[in-house]
Amino acid sequence: MATTTPRYAPLARKIHDAESERLVGVFWREHDVFRRSIAEREGRPDWVFYEGPPTANGLPGVHHVAARLTKDIACRYKTMTGHRVLRKAGWDTHGLPVERSVEKQLGIQGREAIEAYGLEAFNAKCRESVWACKAEWDEFTERLGYWVDLDDPYITYQDRYIESVWWILSRFAAEGLLYRGHKVVPYCPSCGTPLSSHETASGYRTVEDPSIFVKLKAADADEHFLTWTTTPWTLPSNVALAVGADHDYVRVRHGDDVLILAEARLGVLDADVATEVLDRCKGRDLLGRRYEQLFPLLAVPDGKEAFKIVAADFVTLDSGSAFGNAGDGPRDSRARARGHACKDPFATPTSRGTGGLDLEASGHQTADCGHGGGTGFLVVRLQEHVVTHTPQCGRRDLRRRDPARLS
């Protein structure tokens, strides 16, 4: 039987084992290869690399391997093209992961408990915590063959790093590159702090909540916009209604009411009540129409607009009525901005009040503002529970697992 000769001879097994990798690392250290790769290129064009810093209070994982290999490939490539590649390591010493770790160590939970423990003492514990796994990270870096300057890293809690960031921002301001705007971000009452997009993205949970249909009285006619929401608790902060500009809407007489909703969603109406279609239009034909405020708790600020219909791409025809409640959520604020509705939130988390609802940082109301008694808000009916994907703070899980920690 004929045999096929391999195109290439097999690699020696010895270059694949862990001992060989260790010997390469020893060779690099003995001959100071990393430092020489920089020193011997003095005068060449610089290519400066600042590592996006990990947090050393947790062990490295497989995802860090992939990220660091990618970084190392880029740096080695630029070295091969003749650049002097300065690689600076860094340590991220801020953020909720650090605080969560220390809270677990101390057996406390939430902003009030931290303040009772003492901010200075808690910060000191956090400074200790961020170095808990540094030795493991250093070993991981060496075993991976990742070249980076670990002797002089930047550390985000040091004044020189913080001041350098503020200096950079001051240069942006001097060049006119900064502006004052408004952005709605997720807020955790337990932590008493806003949440970053990363923290929010990693904290989504699948939950069941009740949804409701409500009738909102049109300001210019004796008719109602039938609105559906899966978050009834946001109705007091409603400032706009969202529609799909290209959706087909109908004006119908349903019993004693005249309602407006998407034609594709007529099935949500009570089948035992006679329904007569009076008129049809596109969602864009409804833009700018106004309705009565749901809860007349606050006046619209001077120079602002509110309680009008705007277009939004998140309005679909597969559920509800194709009228969406637009409050102070991040997605809602973008829709309001496009429709020029009120861009300033009515409620600001503060114990002192800002001309809006008087709220504590915990989200609790500090003063009785009454029930409103508006004529525009009528609950049509409760809908069955719906499954939603809701962003939640990671500490919420910890509180759920240990109810005794609830403050």
Image (tube, rainbow, N blue to C red):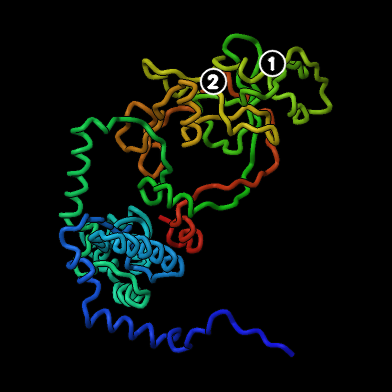
Q: Is residue 13 above or below residue 185?
A: below
The N terminus lies in which quarter of the figure? bottom right
Sequence-wise, the earlier of marks 1 and 2 is 1
Labels 1 & 2 near each other (Cβ < 8 A)? no
Q: Is residue 297 above or below residue 109?
A: above
Q: Which mark is residue 156?
A: none
Residue behind mark 2: 374
Q: At x 30% / y 60%, what residue is drawn?
A: 81
Q: Which residue is the extreme one toward the top?
A: 220
Q: Amino acid at mark 2?
A: Gly
Query: Dot 2: what SS?
Result: loop
Q: Which mark is residue 281?
A: 1
- Give the CA distance from mark 1 to mark 2: 28 Å
Query: Nearest the camera: 256 or 148?
Result: 148
Q: At x 67% / y 44%, what residue is drawn?
A: 385
Query: Nearest the camera: 230 or 341?
Result: 341
Q: Amino acid at mark 1?
A: Cys
Percent across and percent down for residue 2 are: 71, 88
Percent across and percent down for residue 25 are: 31, 81
